[in-house]
Image (cartoon, rainbow, N blue to C red):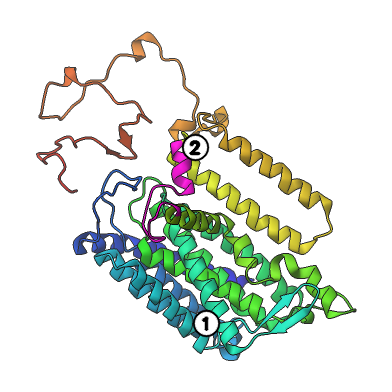
Amino acid sequence: MREYLLTLCVTAAVTYLLTGPVRKFAIVAGAMPEIRARDVHREPTPRLGGIAMFFGLCAGLLVADHLKGLNEVFAKSNEPRALLSGAALIWLIGVLDDKFEIDALVKLGAQMIAAGVMVMQGLTILWLPVPGVGTVSLTQWQGTLLTVALVVITINAVNFADGLDGLAAGMVCIAAAAFFMYAYRIWYGYGLEAAAPATLFAAVLMGMCLGFLPHNMHPARIFMGDSGSMLIGLVLAAGAISVTGQVDPDAMNLFSGSERATVHQTVPVYIPLLLPLTIIAVPVVDFFLAIVRRTWRGQSPFAADRGHLHHRLLDIGHSHSRAVLIMYFWSALISFGALAYSVNSASMWIVLGIMALSAVGLVLLLLPRFTPRAPRWAEAFVPPRYRRRRRLRAEDAQPVPAVGYEDGPSEHRTPVAAGAPSVNGATALGPRSRLDGRKAGSSR
């Protein structure tokens, strides 16, 4: 566990430290597309955050290769190299798309090729545990088609979720945490070495997301772009393929009886098409709803629009931060609910707990105007919008004169209150004031 945590920390540190220089590079390279009708942000924001995430992935795998406990993963399995090969290809296509806007069909073809590269190096689904039947071996073509389909669906589901600041990185981080616990339990608890690569992939994926999140939280200073969203989607799919399609469920020996009983016990999380859906259920639902919505309107399934789940949360009145937190809540509920059910599927308390938390989530959806207030003792640790408003005395309510403005007398300026709709973080949405001789709208 210490070596996994070290790999996670190194990946997060490299990603975090490289994101700042990558942001400056994206600005110089002109990877700052204009605001589109479906966009939520109000100012051009640089992309290419996936560059830092890819180098974080490389650093994490390099460190793991030199650790005594994790070196066996590279010695006994070719899956880490297969992941790195597919990730490099999909990352390169994503970088080109962030800069030059590649056609959707070209990206789809690149996703299939990246999945094929991983299959050629051994990262593929070999068998399926089918309830009531047992472990079914797949032919080479069947395993290849199922692997490619799983990779493509997962990549595009994560890519569709990348619509709000910090949404995709946070949801994938939550999914990776649940997946790490599940894979580590199989590897360490049951002694199955075939689950070690998936455990490593989940740890590295958590580090990539945690290192990028501080730069991507609202208001975001940089976007991961397709180079980042497709990359983390590929890593998540690779972990699911590794632990589901190459770990024999009968080897877990949950029962001393038949293989059918073993498969039936592990079916909630062991079917390859069900496991990634439970881990990233919210993005996958959004993915299929978008396809149905666009085809129903006679549009291409890849035509971008403003009808995703996070857009709907904003339309009903939720703030940007609250919409992201609600999506986090549902992702954590489904991911960790499936994890808890896999540990003890016979416990009624787990089912009741999931139902109770689902009711809480529905209540949160119906209260878009409700703003929680932190207690007095915690106000120093929360943003100003969550603090209780204090009544000002008459002498404290006098307007504070502005100093240093050159475009008008200070007595005619009205102070802007914290949290006003005209302010986006530290940058006003309107024209910038001219400070120190700089013109409005000039870059800093």
Q: Which residue is mark 2?
A: 382
Where is residue 316 shown, x and y percent of the image? 47, 35
For image coordinates 37% across by 67% down, the residue present is: 227
For image coordinates 59% across by 79% down, the residue present is: 197
435 over 215 or under it: above or below: above
Residue at the far right: name it. 257
Where is residue 395 shown, x and y percent of the image? 34, 10
- Which disc is residue 80 wearing? 1
Where is residue 291 shown, x and y percent of the image? 47, 58
Q: Could you tell me which secondary element the residue under label 1 belongs to? A: helix
Q: Is residue 111 left or right of residue 129?
A: left
Amino acid type of disc 2?
A: Val
189 over 430 or under it: above or below: below
Where is residue 94 shown, x and y percent of the image? 35, 69
Rate crowding at label 1 as few (under 14), some (14 to 19) or many (20 or more) other CA atoms within 10 Å. many
Helix, strand or loop: magenta stretch: loop
For image coordinates 37% across by 51% down, the residue present is: 305
Q: Quadrant of residue 194?
A: bottom right
Q: Could you tell me which secondary element the residue under label 2 belongs to? A: loop
Rate crowding at label 2 as few (under 14), some (14 to 19) or many (20 or more) other CA atoms within 10 Å. few
